[in-house]
Image (spheres, rainbow, N blue to C red):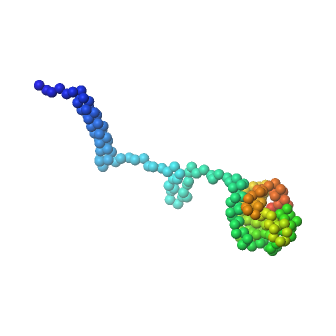
């Protein structure tokens, strides 16, 4: 006569069979997908979200790239201050040798400097040109402000694409593209917003 199994034993056997069935099913699918060379496994190609492979001879196309956010005027002024570090080693524009008397708002005496881009073509002053003007209270060299203009492509039609910034001697911007700067520089010969080449 057979031995009766306890309900606890039956539960263990049922769990064992269920686990075995799961393992056997998984093994079957793995075997079917990988071991039969006559039936190759088809894997969908992985595509990059950012780029695609161009055809030979075609430029690489970048997708999903958002344009860089526009800089604020304050950010531009901060970047400009960094760009002009060492400006005292730059040359002066022709016609402005050293400290010269001035009747402008910049001071009774001024000294000009220009970067290489500006000096290479003072007539046209291409994009990237930077002109620095130190303003002095007197001819003894008491500096009261550093005024800088940088030409940036597409920056502002109102200012002829020039960013005008007035810095104190520590580099803190006190005026950025103010209407008074723009109105004054609109009077420059040739409509180029610069007096440094008049």
Residue 181 to residue 41: above or below = below
Q: Position of residue 118 (x, y in %)?
A: 74, 68
Seen at 85% across and 62% down, the residue is: 105
Which residue is situated farthest in the bottom direction here?
Answer: 97
Q: Is residue 118 visible?
A: yes
Count of numbered marks: 0
Q: Where is residue 114 in the image (x, y as percent from the top left)?
A: 75, 69
Q: Is residue 71 left or right of residue 20?
A: right
Which residue is situated farthest in the right direction here?
Answer: 103
Q: Is residue 126 left or right of residue 184?
A: left
Q: Quadrant of residue 104?
A: bottom right
Q: Is residue 42 left or right of residue 121?
A: left
Q: Can residue 149 be seen in this view?
A: no
Seen at 71% across and 65% down, the residue is: 84
Residue 25 to residue 9: above or below = below
Residue 100 to residue 30: above or below = below
Image quarter in which the C terminus is found: bottom right
Image quarter in which the N terminus is found: top left
Residue situated in front as seen by the camera: 182 or 63: 182
Q: Is residue 39 left or right of residue 138?
A: left
Residue situated in front as seen by the camera: 113 or 173: 173
Q: Where is residue 96 in the image (x, y as percent from the top left)?
A: 81, 72
Residue 92 to residue 71: above or below = below
Seen at 77% across and 57% down, the residue is: 174
Q: Where is residue 151 in the image (x, y as percent from the top left)?
A: 73, 61
Seen at 24% across and 29% down, the residue is: 8
Q: Quadrant of residue 89?
A: bottom right
């Amino acid at each position: 006569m057979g031995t009766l199994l306890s309900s606890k034993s039956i539960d263990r056997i049922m769990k064992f069979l269920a686990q075995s069935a799961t393992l056997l099913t998984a093994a079957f699918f793995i075997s079917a997908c990988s071991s039969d060379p006559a039936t190759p496994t088809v894997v969908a190609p992985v595509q990059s979200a950012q780029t695609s492979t161009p055809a030979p001879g075609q430029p690489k196309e970048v997708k999903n790239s958002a344009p860089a956010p526009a800089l604020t005027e304050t950010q531009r002024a901060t970047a400009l201050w960094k760009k002009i570090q060492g400006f005292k080693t730059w040359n002066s524009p022709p016609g402005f040798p050293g400290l010269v008397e001035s009747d402008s708002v910049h001071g009774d005496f001024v000294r000009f400097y220009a970067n290489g881009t500006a000096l290479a073509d003072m007539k046209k002053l291409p994009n990237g040109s930077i002109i620095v003007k130190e303003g002095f209270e007197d001819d003894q060299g008491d500096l009261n402000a550093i005024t800088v203009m940088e030409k940036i492509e597409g920056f502002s039609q109102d200012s002829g694409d020039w960013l005008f910034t007035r810095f104190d001697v520590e580099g803190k911007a006190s005026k950025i593209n103010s209407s008074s700067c723009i109105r004054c520089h609109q009077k420059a010969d040739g409509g180029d917003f610069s007096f440094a080449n008049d």
